[in-house]
Amino acid sequence: MPVTPAGCNHCPGYTGDVNADVSLVLDFLNTLDAEDDTDVLRSVADWHAWAHARALTPGAIDEAVRARTVLRDAAGAPADDTAATPGAPKGGGDDGPRIPVDVAFRLSPSADPQLVADDAVSAVFTAAMRLAVLDDWRRIKICPADDCLWAFYDESRNRSRTWCSMQVCGNRVKARTFRKRAGSSGPEDSTAGRPQPD
Ligand SMILES: [Zn+2]
């Protein structure tokens, strides 16, 4: 379900637009909608429309699919802060995929240096990198409900949010778990639509 980010954590010296970065990353991750079984990246025309709507150059659709897969896999990582070596770069392992991006470094006498990308996938990666620098990447999460899988931004103070919506996915999964524990032999209610949040 759509969850609009608002009030992100800003670093004092940051001059970019965190909300724009969060929105771009979430929009890209949510080009796949498990609940509605729709996927912008099934169609070149849809992918091009998505990119053009954001004034970006679409690029090859298979690269976009790959980018979305690795970003979804990486969302919320690293999960365990305590495993990180103090002083080591976050996520500093070299065992993950290495994907080239087309990013330019823009210098202006009147503004701080900026990373800019016109290519849609590169722009998403650049936004993700900016969030990582701000320590906000870990707030990008995927709802674990297998019929949801919606990407959302965890604004909670200690980054403890699990579900895109506790009222919807959290309660639904809890109810299922309860039914299973109670030994309910009734069929899973797979035809029910998503309950509407209050
Ligand atoms: Zn959800």
Image (cartoon, rainbow, N blue to C red):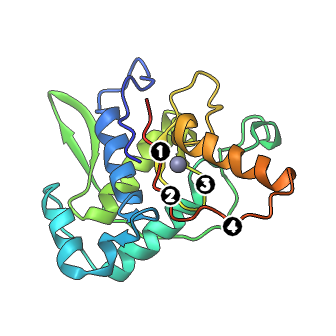
Q: Spatial distance from mark 3 to mark 4, Cα to Cα? A: 18 Å
Mark 2, residue position: 192
Is residue 48 depicted above or below 82 in this figure? Answer: below
- Identify the mark at residue 145; answer none if there is no mark: 3
Q: The residue tagged with tag 3: helix, strand or loop?
A: loop
Is mark 3 in CB contact (under 8 Å) with mark 4?
no
* Mark 2 surroundings within 10 Å by alpha-carbon count, few (fewer than 14), some (14 through 19), many (20 or more): few
- Disc 2/disc 1 C-alpha distance (Å): 8 Å
Residue 150: mark: none
Q: Tell me the crowding category of disc 1: few under 14, some 14 to 19, or many 20 or more residues within 10 angstroms, Cα based.
A: few
Residue 10 or residue 48, whichever sits in front: 48
Amino acid type of disc 1? Pro
Residue 50 lies, in percent from the top left, at 20, 63
Q: Find out whether the residues at labels 2 and 4 contact each other: C-beta distance under 8 Å.
A: no
Residue type marked 3? Ala
Is the CB of the residue bearing disc 2 within 8 angstroms of ligand 1?
no
Residue at position x 35%, y 36% from top?
4
User: Residue 41 appears at what percent x and percent y?
Assistant: 33, 75
Q: Nearer the viewer, residue 38 or 58?
A: 38
Between tags 3 and 2, which lies in front? 2
Which label lies toward us, 3 or 1?
Answer: 1
